[in-house]
C-alpha cells in the first residue's frame, strides 16, 4: 500500500509540475494517451494483454477448466438449476436497480454491493419460508420427503445459497475462459495492430520519462520497477500533494 501511495504521489506531482512548465506538451501527451486507449478499446484488449495473454489462454489450464465446467454441469445439474432459477432473476433485478440509480461507475459498485447484501439473503430466507409453508403440498409430489416443515425450509435456503455460489463460480470461470480465447485470437489476427500499439506505448513512455527526468520527485524507481521511498525529494512539492488514500 505504501508503494502505491508513493506511486500516485509521483504521478500527481509530476503532472502538476509539467502543467506549469510545459502545458502544451502535457496536452499533446494526454491526447496521445487517449488515442492509445481508444485503439485498445477498439481491439477489446487491456494494456498488459499486448504482451501476454490471460492465464487461461494456456491450453492446459483451459482444458482443466472445461473438465471442471462439464463435471459441475453433468454431476450437479439440480443444484445448478436451483442456483440459476433462484438467484438469476434477483441478479437481473439488482442490475436493473443499479442501472436506474447509479450515475457513475463508483455508484454502480456501491449500490450493487449494498443492495445485493440485502436482496440475496432476503431471497434465500423467503425461499425457505415458502418451502416450509407449503410443506404438505410439496410432499404430495415427493411422498418420500422426510423431516418437518422447518427442516425443509432450512434445506431449501441452504440449497439456494450453494446453488448461487456454484452458478456464480462457473459463470465467472466461463467468462474468463471466453475472454482468454478472444484475446489469444485477437493477438494472432491483429499482429500489425498489436505491434503498432506496442510502439505507440513505448513512444509515450519515452516522452513521459524525458519530460519528467529533471523533476525532483519523491521516491526512487528500482531496476525491477518498484518505487522505493528514499526520504528525499518531497519537500518542494509537499504543498500540492494529494491526500493519501
Image (cartoon, helix red, strand yellow):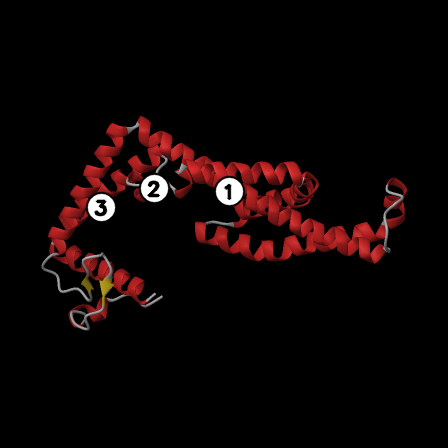
Under tag 1, what secondary structure? helix
> Does any portion of residue 67 appear in the rendered image?
yes
The foreground one among 127 and 55 is 55
Of residues 15 and 137, the one drawn nearer to the viewer in this rendering: 137
Q: Earlier in the sequence, mark 1 or mark 3?
A: 3
Front tag of 1 and 2: 1
Q: Are marks 1 and 2 in contact (CB under 8 Å)?
A: no
Q: Which residue is mark 3?
A: 30
Q: Which mark is residue 173?
A: 1
Asked if 32 appears above or below 114 in the picture, the reply is above
Specify whether 53 is left or right of 113. Answer: left
Q: CA distance from mark 1 to mark 3?
A: 36 Å
In this view, the mark in front (1 or 3): 1
Q: Quadrant of the C terminus?
A: bottom left
Residue 234 location in percent, x, y? Answer: 19, 70
Give the SS element for disc 3: helix
Q: Residues within 10 Å of mark 2 (few under 14, many from 20)?
A: few
Residue at the spot of label 2: 46
Relative height, residue 173 to residue 156 (above, below): above
Q: Where is residue 227, by image quadrant?
A: bottom left
Q: Quadrant of the N terminus?
A: bottom left
Tag 1 near tag 3, CB within 8 Å: no
In terms of depth relative to the viewer, which is nearer, 11 or 222? 222
Q: Which residue does the image show at 14% across and 52% down from the upper left?
A: 209
Residue situated furthest top in the rendering:
189
Q: Is residue 152 left or right of residue 7?
A: right
Residue 204, by quadrant, is top left
Q: Is residue 89 left or right of residue 143?
A: left
Q: Residue at x 64, y 53 (%)?
A: 119
Q: What residue is shown at x 42% (from left), y 40% (from top)?
A: 56
Asked whether the beta carbons under mark 2 and mark 3 sit within 8 Å of each other, the answer is no
Residue at the left extreme, as displayed: 214
Amino acid at each position: 500500500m505504501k508503494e502505491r501511495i508513493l506511486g500516485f504521489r509521483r504521478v500527481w506531482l509530476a503532472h502538476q509540475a509539467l502543467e506549469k512548465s510545459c502545458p502544451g506538451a502535457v496536452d499533446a501527451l494526454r491526447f496521445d494517451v487517449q488515442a492509445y486507449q481508444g485503439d485498445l478499446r477498439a481491439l477489446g484488449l487491456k494494456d498488459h494483454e499486448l504482451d501476454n495473454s490471460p492465464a487461461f489462454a494456456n491450453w492446459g489450464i483451459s482444458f482443466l477448466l472445461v473438465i471442471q465446467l462439464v463435471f459441475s454441469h453433468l454431476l450437479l445439474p439440480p443444484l445448478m438449476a436451483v442456483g440459476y432459477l433462484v438467484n438469476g432473476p434477483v441478479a437481473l433485478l439488482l442490475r436493473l436497480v443499479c442501472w436506474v440509480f447509479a450515475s457513475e461507475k463508483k455508484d454502480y459498485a456501491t449500490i450493487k454491493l449494498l443492495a445485493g447484501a440485502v436482496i440475496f439473503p432476503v431471497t434465500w430466507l423467503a425461499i425457505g419460508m415458502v418451502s416450509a409453508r407449503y410443506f404438505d403440498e410439496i410432499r404430495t409430489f415427493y411422498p418420500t420427503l422426510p423431516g418437518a416443515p422447518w427442516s425443509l425450509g432450512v434445506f431449501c435456503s441452504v440449497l439456494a445459497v450453494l446453488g448461487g455460489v456454484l452458478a456464480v463460480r462457473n459463470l465467472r470461470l466461463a467468462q474468463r475462459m471466453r475472454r482468454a480465447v478472444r484475446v489469444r485470437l485477437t493477438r494472432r489476427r491483429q499482429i500489425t495492430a498489436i505491434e503498432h500499439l506496442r510502439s505507440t506505448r513505448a513512444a509515450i513512455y519515452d516522452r513521459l520519462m524525458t519530460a519528467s527526468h529533471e523533476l525532483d520527485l519523491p521516491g526512487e524507481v528500482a531496476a525491477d520497477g518498484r518505487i522505493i521511498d528514499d526520504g528525499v525529494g518531497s519537500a518542494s512539492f509537499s504543498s500540492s500533494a494529494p491526500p493519501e488514500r
